Image (cartoon, rainbow, N blue to C red):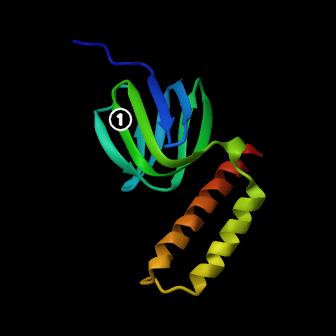
């Protein structure tokens, strides 16, 4: 019987760049059906991702970032995330994220949920809220 892996290689990429490639103990992904926790030895899985916070733990230290849409391939010893956008905490401007949140909330007040623009503005709101959550965790 093969030994289960004790670590996970986590790779996150967007169209523009590789965000991280690191060995971790645990990963939590914002999947479209809810959060997915991944530990070494996880059953292979392919899942879609929504806007939200992605977390990973390395030697007891928790790291967070914001993922916006994409896919994740989960294997027993590896997680590969292909995201539309991914932002590390140091790339987030909390003042700009708060302004975006306020603007999106105001715009949503004037839109019907049937308006094609509604989903776009709602996504901007969700992303700004996720960025604010990650930036608050730093302070």
Q: Residue at x 73, y 67 (%)?
A: 99
**Which corner quadrant holds the N terminus?**
top left
* 28 sits to left or right of 58: left
Counting other residues with Cα less than 10 Å from the Cα at mark 1, is it few (<14), some (14-19), or many (20 or more)?
Answer: many
Q: Viewer-proximal residue, 4 or 101?
A: 101
Instruction: Pick out the residue farthest to the left.
Output: 1
Q: Quadrant of residue 60?
A: top right
Where is residue 57? Give x, y as percent: 56, 32
Q: Secondary structure at mark 1?
A: strand
Q: Residue 118: x, y in percent? A: 49, 77
Residue 94 locus on image (x, y percent): 74, 56
* Residue 130 % position (x, y): 60, 56
Residue marked by disc 1: 74
Q: Nearer the viewer, residue 86 or 5?
A: 86
Q: Nearer the viewer, residue 113 or 83?
A: 83
Q: Is residue 113 left or right of residue 103?
A: left
As displayed, is residue 57 above or below residue 55? above
The residue that appears at 77% across and 46% down in the rendered structure is 139
Instruction: Judge by depth and name the residue closer to the eye, 14 or 31.
Output: 14
Count of numbered badges drawn on the protein: 1
Above or below residue 98? Residue 2 is above
Extreme residue toward the front, this view: 16
């Amino acid at each position: 019987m093969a030994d289960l892996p004790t670590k996970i290689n986590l790779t996150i990429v967007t169209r523009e760049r590789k965000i991280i490639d690191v060995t971790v103990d645990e990963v939590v992904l914002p999947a479209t059906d809810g959060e997915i926790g991944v530990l070494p030895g996880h059953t292979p899985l392919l899942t879609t991702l929504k806007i939200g916070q992605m977390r990973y733990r390395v030697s007891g230290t928790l790291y967070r970032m914001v993922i916006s849409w994409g896919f994740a391939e989960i294997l027993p010893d590896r997680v590969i995330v292909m995201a539309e956008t991914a932002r590390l905490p140091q790339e987030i401007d909390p003042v700009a994220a708060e302004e975006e949140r306020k603007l999106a909330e105001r715009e949503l007040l004037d839109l019907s949920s049937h308006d094609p623009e509604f989903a776009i503005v709602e996504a901007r709101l969700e992303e700004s809220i996720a960025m604010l959550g990650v930036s608050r965790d730093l302070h």
